Image (cartoon, rainbow, N blue to C red):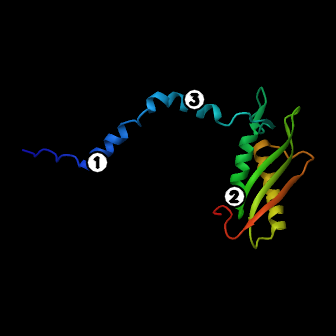
Amino acid sequence: MSSPPPPPDPLFRAIEFLRSAPEPGWNAIAGRVISSIRSTARTGGHPLVAQTPPGMGGRGRLFVSDHVLRSTLAVELRQRYLCAPTRITFDMDDESKTLRGVTIELTGSYGTDLRQLADHIRVTTLDVVADLLGQTVGQGPVDVTVTDVVTGDPLGA
């Protein structure tokens, strides 16, 4: 005959109880909080026309939000270079939904050759735009401005 299982640990029971018990008053405000969060999520993005990949033609056009381009570019720059992009803006043609130029502001690291960093960032920006939109940045520039320099990793500053 087997013995009954030992009683649950008191700390374990307390943890389980707290996980299952809602915060006092949460039920009354949960709907409003969730609705507010959903309504403040990235709205108002601007579509940029993207070229359909070869062999994938179909009816309609493909657009990529400027939010997608901005976040992809920021991640790529942070991963490749010792810098922290602080602002990325786009010059867009509202009528044709095309990209005319890019402006990037960033924090660099003390001791970095900032002109070389800016050149690398311009090239990477053009690559990211080409990957996402299948096009180049129109006739406009890719402007890079270093707004601050810190010692060490700018992402940790």
Quarter holding residue 91: top right
Which quadrant: the C terminus? bottom right
Which amino acid, by three-letter code, is at mark 3? Ser
Distance, label 3 to label 1, CA atoms, is: 34 Å
Mark 2 / mark 3, whichever is N-terminal = 3
Which amino acid, by three-letter code, is at mark 2? Arg
Mark 2 surroundings within 10 Å by alpha-carbon count, few (fewer than 14), some (14 through 19), many (20 or more) = some
Give the number of the mark in front: 2 or 3.
3
In the displayed structure, does residue 16 sit left or right of residue 120?
left
State yes or no: discs 1 and 2 in contact (Cβ < 8 Å): no
Distance, label 2 to label 3, CA atoms, is: 32 Å
Distance, label 1 to label 2, CA atoms, is: 41 Å
Single out the residue that lies furthest toward the bottom.
Answer: 111
Mark 3 surroundings within 10 Å by alpha-carbon count, few (fewer than 14), some (14 through 19), many (20 or more) = few
Which amino acid, by three-letter code, is at mark 1? Phe
Task: List the residue tagged with mark 3.
Answer: 35
Quarter holding residue 22: top left
Mark 1 / mark 2, whichever is N-terminal = 1
Q: Which mark is residue 12?
A: 1
Single out the residue that lies furthest toward the front.
Answer: 25
Q: Which of 61 and 6 lies nearest the eye of the viewer? A: 6
Q: Which of 9 and 128 lies nearest the eye of the viewer? A: 9
Residue 7, image x, y percentages: 18, 46
Task: List the residue tagged with mark 2.
Answer: 78
Q: Which of 17 and 138 lies nearest the eye of the viewer? A: 17
Single out the residue that lies furthest toward the left.
Answer: 1
State yes or no: discs 2 and 3 in contact (Cβ < 8 Å): no
- The structure residue drawn at horizontal position 75% and vertical position 37%, both measured from the top left corner, is 64
Residue 14, image x, y percentages: 29, 45
- The structure residue drawn at horizontal position 68% and vertical position 37%, both measured from the top left corner, is 42
108 is higher (above) or lower (below) than 95: below
